[in-house]
Amino acid sequence: MFFTSWFLAVLAVVLAWPVPLLLSRARWTSRSPFSAMVLWQSIALAGGLSMIGAMLVFGLVPLGDNLLSGMRALLGIVLGSGFGPKPDPLGRLGFWNAFALSAAALLLAHLLFTLLLTFLRIRTQQNRHRQLLALLGSPAAGRPGTVVINHEAPVAYCLPGGARSITVLSDGLMNLLAPDELRAVLIHENTHLVQRHHLLLWAFAAWRSALPWLPTSRLAQRAVNSLIEMLADDEALKTVDRATLVSAIALVASGPAQLPASELVDAGRQQIDTPQTTSARLGRLLTPVPALARNSRALILAGSAALLALPTALLIVPGLLGG
């Protein structure tokens, strides 16, 4: 298990710095947003698993030849049963082993707690936002699940909530956009709801809140925000032409700069594209390149699965690396 712990530690470092940095600079991601998004998820999950697994396995080295036997021995120590190796398993657990086990437990608890805290914070914000919309918005005529707010700035975003999910539009947007442009915006926002992009945003927001110093969390959140917008754009392109979508994006992007400070706007501001995301979306639409070849996409997806499977296999397969 000693070699396994160090291999996982090296893998965690690689996935925490050079890999996300290289992927954030890659040019192919806009040609296959779905493949890129899966790869980002794999990097984040494999990195977290490797980080926790390296400390866990290192801590269990004196207690067993593999993770299962080590965990059985640790359980025996904690419960005071006869599962642990003899003699005196607690005495064989050195300072650094105990430190590594404690660090693994604390990191896991920190990640889970931050995930839950982020979920509760977002849910509270969404509920508050929904209450504000009930007071300040009105249902759009002939558009189920759509609410219109009275404001001249062109604003469009979606508010997830299962059966209560809604799309929010402003009067200014509906007056400014042509029918085809408005249809493109509605398809774009509906795609976010149907494909449940808010769950990805929640997970990566929690990852960044838990480990803000980690390049993976910062770069991944920024990339995923952009990639889900591209996925929604691709869905809209199935119905409207490219020029219409470009015009709609440009007009909607002008909205945030015109928004005054208000409780309703602040509640929904996080749903609005950043200038960087808008620039990336317009860039791929104005200078289109061929989609990534099917073989390339399959290779990326297979690599993503292998990347996630590697630390998992090292943890559950006894003696995979020996030592």
Image: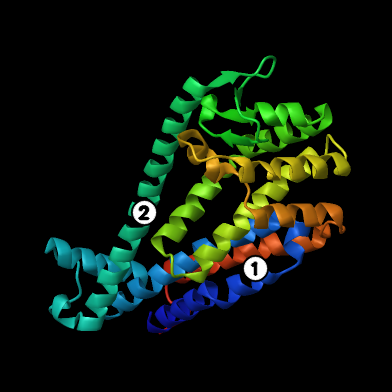
- Picture disc at residue 295: none
Amino acid type at circle 2 is Thr
Q: Is residue 245 left or right of residue 219?
A: right
Task: Find residue 142 and report its horizontal and vertical position in percent.
Answer: 70, 15
Per the image, the residue denoted by label 1 is 24
Q: Nearer the viewer, residue 121 or 178?
A: 178
Vertical order, 257 against 105 (above or below): above
Q: Residue at x 61, y 36 (%)?
A: 157
Q: Quadrant of residue 222?
A: bottom right
Vertical order, 16 against 256 (above or below): below
Amino acid type at circle 1 is Ser
Task: Find residue 221 and report its horizontal and vertical position in percent.
Answer: 55, 58
Q: Is residue 311 left or right of residue 154?
A: left
Q: Is residue 124 left or right of residue 149?
A: left
Q: Identify the secondary structure beneath mark 2.
A: helix
Task: Find residue 318 and report its horizontal and vertical position in percent.
Answer: 42, 72
Q: Is residue 42 left or right of residue 182?
A: left
How far is mark 1 from mark 2, CA to CA?
25 Å
Q: Residue at x 42, y 58 (%)?
A: 209
Q: Nearer the viewer, residue 157 or 63?
A: 157
Q: Identify the secondary structure beneath mark 1.
A: helix
Q: Nearer the viewer, residue 15 or 170?
A: 170
Task: Find residue 40 and report its horizontal and vertical position in percent.
Answer: 60, 61
Per the image, the residue denoted by label 2 is 114
Quarter placement of the C terminus: bottom left
Chain-order first, disc 1 or disc 2: 1
Neighbour class for label 1 at 10 Å: few (<14), some, many (≥20)? some
Quarter placement of the N terminus: bottom left
Tell me the colour scheme of the image: rainbow
